[in-house]
């Protein structure tokens, strides 16, 4: 499929994407948590609460929290394969577009074994790497020593995004300087840089056009936080996640600053600044090109694009507003090891940015490895933070992106209403739900989707109804999510969440906490359960079993520290004799686990390899 002009491209994109949502929502996020790390559990608890992530979209994947680097083969076998197998086994493949990692996973990937498979010599004394690496865009005149040093190291989220080539063990594709077809190449027919949402099921052609076959697919990926070495404290991470969630649809009035100076780190992107400012101003978003290394005494920083090796944000006197993307073109911004050179990306997050990025090794000042200034344009048009980042980077394999992937300050978020059902209704048989929605801009609605307990069940067009056969569900508590998807290329989402009780088989369950709702981590949590006819009872924290009871009634004790600090949601399920349809679900139990005095809240003392 060839792109003839911008208008035609938009119409083709709209036709392809109308069958599924984009724009990003909690149902589209798969969150990976390290249960061996209190920090990882705590950050995940807060993100799940803030973003209403469904419990089935959470994977607890044990990993040594002291591991900063990992080889590419263990990355495949111990991280990527378990993630994608779990998504498939939970029947979430059709809805997951984001893989977000909580903290304490290895963020740097060493790819030596893959490179050797394509004949790359990793010793500076061998033949020049540029003679042996057939990578599109790698120029022969680049220093072979630098190539051999920088090529083997990639980021966790970069290789997760490029998972197809990584799982196929095709480094010639994932190291390509134009590996990301979601980042569209400019064409003569385009009068402006287009922005679209994202679906992992979409296939992209080499110019960024959507194709029906033989294209490339990806998976958006971001780390919520980094607590290694030069990373952030847990409290800093929780605070910027809270600020980010609160900034959605705020349409902020701050200014996006493009900072220029004579450093090559800055000059590499200067030629792109004027067009970015022009396009932002068309949207009514304030944008300025200023001289220096960092904005000075600016109290309205809604975003920043910089190029400098070192900076001190606190000393600048400037204020980062909620929802801001801040990024710096420099070599070691994504290196978290204590004693590393240059200012790390975490400095922006410490002072409230929603997201920041940096490379995990020397990137040799290759422009394709960094976000282009258009990142701020995609964001200001309503894309999520993750969509904006990945639409602006041609070669993302070395970029470490940290922050809130769902943050979307300029999104046109639909306001959803439904008829045919009310919160806490007790229902039987077939449900007919009629949704309606409006948007702040007056943009129409493309379609509605119904999620049951986090899984997409059905969809309908405006004016139609969503139909659900409740007899296919177990008795008890169910969570319905009715999601409205905005018409147009961004396809921002809005939702209403309705709890209901199904009662088709006469099953019942009672579950209550006998301890306080706020509990110290060194105290046990006690749940008293009565579920007549159940052969046993389990307690889930999202997707993992944290408590069990043989028989139909009794007490379940759970050590609060095992849950992590912060807001925790527990689901108590009475097990029937005939499989999942015969189970019965109690309403969720929501508690808060206090922060432990021993929790690691100081990045300088955090686990390091």
Image (cartoon, helix red, strand yellow):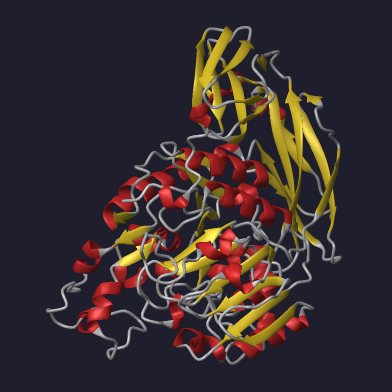
Q: How many marks?
A: 0
In the depicted view, which residue is nearer to us: 263 or 187?
Answer: 263
Q: What residue is shown at x 50% (from left), y 28% (from top)?
A: 561
In the depicted view, which residue is nearer to us: 578 or 455?
Answer: 455
Say if residue 45 shows up in the picture. yes
The image quadrant where one finds the N terminus is bottom right
In this image, 195 relative to 596: left or right?
right
In this image, 585 relative to 342: left or right?
right
Residue 334 on image: x %, y %: 43, 65
In the depicted view, which residue is nearer to us: 562 or 21?
Answer: 562
Taking the view exactly as shown, the residue that stands out farthest to the left is 125
| Quadrant of residue 166 within the rendered picture | bottom left
Say if residue 578 shows up in the picture. no
Q: Is residue 218 above or below residue 90?
A: below
Q: Is residue 28 above or below residue 511?
A: below
In this image, 134 relative to 465: left or right?
left
In the depicted view, which residue is nearer to us: 305 or 553?
Answer: 305
Q: Is residue 606 above or below residue 205?
A: above
Q: What residue is shown at x 51% (from left), y 23% (from top)?
A: 522
| Quadrant of residue 56 within the rendered picture | top right
Residue 158 on image: x %, y %: 43, 63
Residue 436 on image: x %, y %: 85, 50
Residue 40 on image: x %, y %: 48, 43
Q: What residue is shown at x 84% (from left), y 34% (from top)?
A: 421
| Quadrant of residue 531 within the rendered picture | top right
Q: Is residue 351 above or below residue 144?
A: above
């Amino acid at each position: 499929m060839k792109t003839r002009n911008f208008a035609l491209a938009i119409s083709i994109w709209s036709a392809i994407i109308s069958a599924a949502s984009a724009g990003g929502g909690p149902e589209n996020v798969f969150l990976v948590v390290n249960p061996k790390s209190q920090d990882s559990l705590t950050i995940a608890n807060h993100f799940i609460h803030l973003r209403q992530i469904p419990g089935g979209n959470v994977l607890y994947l044990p990993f040594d929290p002291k591991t900063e680097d990992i080889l590419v083969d263990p990355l495949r076998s111990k991280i990527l394969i378990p993630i994608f197998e779990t998504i498939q086994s939970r029947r979430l493949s059709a809805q997951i577009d984001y893989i977000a990692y909580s903290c304490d996973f290895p963020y740097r990937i060493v790819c030596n074994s893959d490179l050797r498979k394509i004949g790359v010599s990793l010793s500076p004394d061998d033949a020049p790497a540029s003679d042996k690496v057939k990578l599109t865009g790698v120029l022969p005149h680049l220093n072979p020593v630098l190539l051999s040093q920088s090529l083997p190291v990639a980021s966790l989220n970069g290789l997760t995004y490029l998972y197809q080539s990584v799982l196929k063990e095709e480094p010639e594709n994932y190291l390509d300087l134009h590996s990301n077809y979601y980042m569209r190449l400019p064409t003569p027919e385009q009068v402006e840089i287009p922005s679209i949402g994202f679906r992992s099921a979409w296939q992209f052609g080499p110019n960024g056009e959507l194709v029906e076959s033989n294209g490339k697919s990806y998976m958006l990926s971001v780390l919520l936080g980094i607590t290694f070495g030069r990373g952030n404290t847990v409290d800093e991470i929780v605070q910027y996640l809270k600020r980010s969630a609160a900034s959605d649809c705020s349409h902020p009035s701050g200014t996006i600053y493009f900072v220029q100076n004579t450093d090559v780190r800055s000059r590499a992107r200067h030629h792109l600044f004027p067009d970015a400012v022009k396009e932002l101003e068309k949207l009514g978003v304030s944008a300025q090109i200023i001289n220096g290394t960092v904005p000075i005494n600016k109290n309205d920083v809604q975003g920043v694009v910089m190029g400098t090796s070192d900076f001190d944000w606190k000393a600048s006197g400037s204020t980062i507003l909620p929802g801001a993307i801040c990024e710096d073109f420099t070599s070691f911004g994504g290196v978290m090891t204590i004693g590393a050179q240059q200012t790390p990306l975490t400095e922006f997050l410490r002072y409230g940015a929603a997201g920041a990025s940096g490379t995990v090794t020397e990137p040799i000042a290759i422009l394709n490895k960094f976000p282009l200034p258009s990142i701020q344009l995609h964001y200001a048009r309503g894309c999520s933070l993750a969509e904006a980042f990945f639409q602006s980077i041609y070669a993302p394999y070395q970029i470490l992106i940290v922050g809130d992937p769902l943050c979307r300050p300029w999104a046109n978020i639909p306001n959803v209403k439904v008829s045919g059902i009310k919160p806490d209704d007790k229902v039987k048989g077939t449900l007919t739900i009629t949704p309606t929605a409006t948007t702040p801009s007056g943009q129409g609605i493309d379609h509605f989707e119904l999620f049951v307990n986090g899984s997409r069940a059905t969809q309908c067009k405006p004016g139609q109804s969503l139909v659900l056969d409740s007899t296919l569900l177990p008795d008890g508590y169910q969570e319905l999510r009715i999601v409205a998807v905005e018409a147009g290329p961004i396809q921002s989402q809005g939702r209403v969440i309705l709890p209901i009780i199904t009662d088709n088989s006469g099953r019942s369950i009672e579950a209550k906490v006998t301890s306080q709702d706020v509990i110290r981590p060194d105290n046990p949590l006690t749940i008293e359960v009565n579920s007549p006819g159940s052969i046993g009872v389990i307690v889930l924290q999202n997707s993992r079993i944290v408590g069990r009871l043989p028989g139909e009634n009794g007490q379940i004790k759970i050590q609060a520290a095992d849950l992590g600090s912060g807001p925790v949601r527990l689901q108590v399920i009475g097990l029937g004799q005939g499989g999942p349809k015969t189970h019965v679900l109690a309403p969720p139990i929501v508690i808060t686990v206090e922060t432990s005095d021993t929790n690691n809240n100081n990045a300088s003392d955090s686990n390091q390899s």
